[in-house]
Every structure is written in structure tokens, then in C-alpha cells.
Image (cartoon, grey):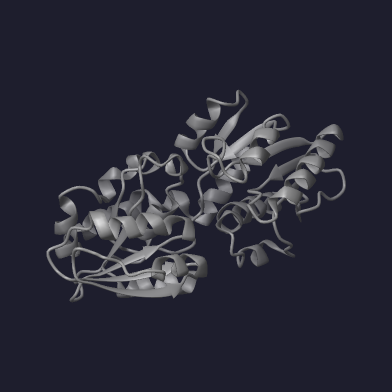
Amino acid sequence: MHVLMPGQFETPADMAGSNLASVRMRVVPAALALQARGTQVTWGEQVQGTPDRVLVAKIGGHDIAARQAQWLQQIAQARRCGASIWVDYTDHHLGYASVMSGFYASVLELADAFTVPSACMQRLLSGQWQGPVQVVPDAIEVDCVVPKNAHGEPVTALWFGHASNVAYLRTFLEEGLVADQPLRLIVLSNQAGLDILTARPIEARVPLDILVAEWSIDTMREAAQQSDVCLIPSDTQDPKKMAVSANRLITALALGLPTAADWLESYAEFGAYFTDIRSGELAALLQQPTRHADRVAEAQRSVVPRFAQAAVSAAWARVLG
């Protein structure tokens, strides 16, 4: 099998250092699963040899005009040579206009099967494509941390996410945040996200002390140790968020943090373990986060193990056969 993917890497361990979440959370466990069962696997932007299967990872928006044509040509050639084409579809680019929409509209004609990170995405894609669509969740990148039994003063909230999510955070802080006391907020993002956040002052309705840092796995772990809760505001009406994976929610729970999030469809099955960020329960969560430690611990027992890398690798092994 060849994994058609952005970047050049020698081993799956090298891929784990990629700045692309789709590589770390999806390609790495897939490659490890294939290698574990003795399948010969190659990867990179050039299809090597004549593989019997090609797994198409997220193409990404970088230099899309040139890369789209190159990838589609290689996929078509591999198919003509007898390869089956599996496409890993991680964002619903067919549901809204994006720089990647044209690529995914074209690849519909070449694919034999799709993999997606959520049942919500499976439902949406199945409305536009009649072939097999298999769900394989994103792998989380952290081990479970025992929830705290005491909180700091002031309460510290953690937010982490890509630049594409910063607008939801800003809107929430200025229009949706309800709290009865001052709040400390740690924001972790890529540099582009931090630039967006700090471009102008945030006019929150509660006293807010914001600390920012560039995201990395280690920085996220350290920030979680300093935090009492996690906030994941989004927009349930935004087509871009219709089928997002539950990765940020599951990661926050694994980090031991009581979490408030928007009620996205892919989060709904985990509703027993987080607070609706638009509800009246948010103020109570921010006032006494440790009262929610038990449901975080329950999530770590019953839900989080499904998203561990070993479990996700096993899911890839079952799907790819």
C-alpha cells in the first residue's frame, strides 16, 4: 500500500512530529497497523511502484492548485494499474466552498472506499457518494491524567486549537462567556492563530487574564497541569463544523479537565461527560470545576480508551483488511 500524503518522512515515528494533525492522528496509526501485520507500506507525495492499494490522506491547502492536479493524476494512474483507492476524508469540504472542495469533488469519481473520523461525517458523505464509508476515529496524543480535587484562584481555563478555530473563541469570549468571578485563560494555537487572537483587544464581559503560547503536545500537557477547566466554543450553525471529529473534546477529558463545549453533532454521544457551553451550567462549572471531576474520571474509563493510538491502529487494521 502507498499512503499519498503531504511531506516526506522516513518512518511513522518521524510522522508523529508533523505539524499536521491529520498526519499525526490518522496516518500514523494507519501506518503502524499496516506495518504490524507485515504489509509493505510506502508514503509521500509520489506514489511508489505499483501498489495494490492507495490510501489518500488529507491533501491540505498548501500549493493546492499544483498539488491537486498532481495527486489526481497519480490516483488515476494507480487505479488504471489495478490499485483500489481509499480516501481519508477528515473535513466536509463537499459541504461548503473551500480550496480543497474541487479536489474532493474530483476524487469522488476515482475512489473505491472512504474513511471518515465520525458517524456524522459518514452520514453526510453517504448523501453524496454511494460507496462504502468506514468510520475510524482520530487518535488522541496524550495519556490520561487524574482529574484534580482542588482548583486554583482564579480558576484557569485552557483553550487549544488551530487558527481556524480562533474566531469561535473570540466570539465566545466577547458575547457568550458568563462567569461570576475573574478568569485566567491559557490559549494554545499555531502562530497564525495567536496573531489572529492578539490582533485587537478582546472585550470580554468578565475580568479576563489571557496567556498565549504556541501549541505543542508538551506545551499542552504542561498547560493542562496549570488549568482547572477546558473551553471548546464553536458554532453549531457553521457548515465547516458540521462533521468535525470529537478529538479536542476527548483530548480535554483525557487531560483530566472538566470541559464546556458547544453541542456539536459529533460531541452529542459524549454529552454525559461535558457541560453545554451555552447553558446556565457554565457559570457553575467555572465556579466549582472539581464538582465535575467524577464524570471526567468516568469518561476516562469508558470513552477515552477507544481513542488511544493502539485502539485506533486496531480500527485501521479492521477497516483496511
Residue 93 appears left or right of 83 = left
Seen from the viewer's position, the closer of residues 49 and 123 is 123
Q: Quadrant of residue 56?
A: top right
Q: Residue furthest left?
A: 180
- In this rendering, the answer to whether 196 lies above or below 281 is below
Q: Quadrant of residue 62?
A: bottom right
- Is residue 320 visible to us here? no
Q: Residue furthest front?
A: 200
- In this rendering, the answer to whether 96 lies above or below 10 is above
- In this rendering, the answer to whether 171 lies above or below 132 is below
Name the residue rendered at 19%, 75% in the picture: 154
Q: Quadrant of the C terminus?
A: top right
Residue 113 at x, y = what percent?
A: 65, 32
Residue 82 at x, y = what percent?
A: 83, 33
- Is residue 118 visible to us here? yes
Seen from the viewer's position, the closer of residues 2 and 215 is 215
Name the residue rendered at 25%, 51% in the picture: 277
Residue 21 appears left or right of 230 = right
Residue 156 at x, y = what percent?
A: 26, 71
Residue 253 at x, y = what percent?
A: 34, 58
Name the residue rendered at 74%, 62% in the picture: 8
Q: Quadrant of the N terminus?
A: top right
Seen from the viewer's position, the closer of residues 249 and 32 is 249
Name the residue rendered at 61%, 46% in the picture: 99
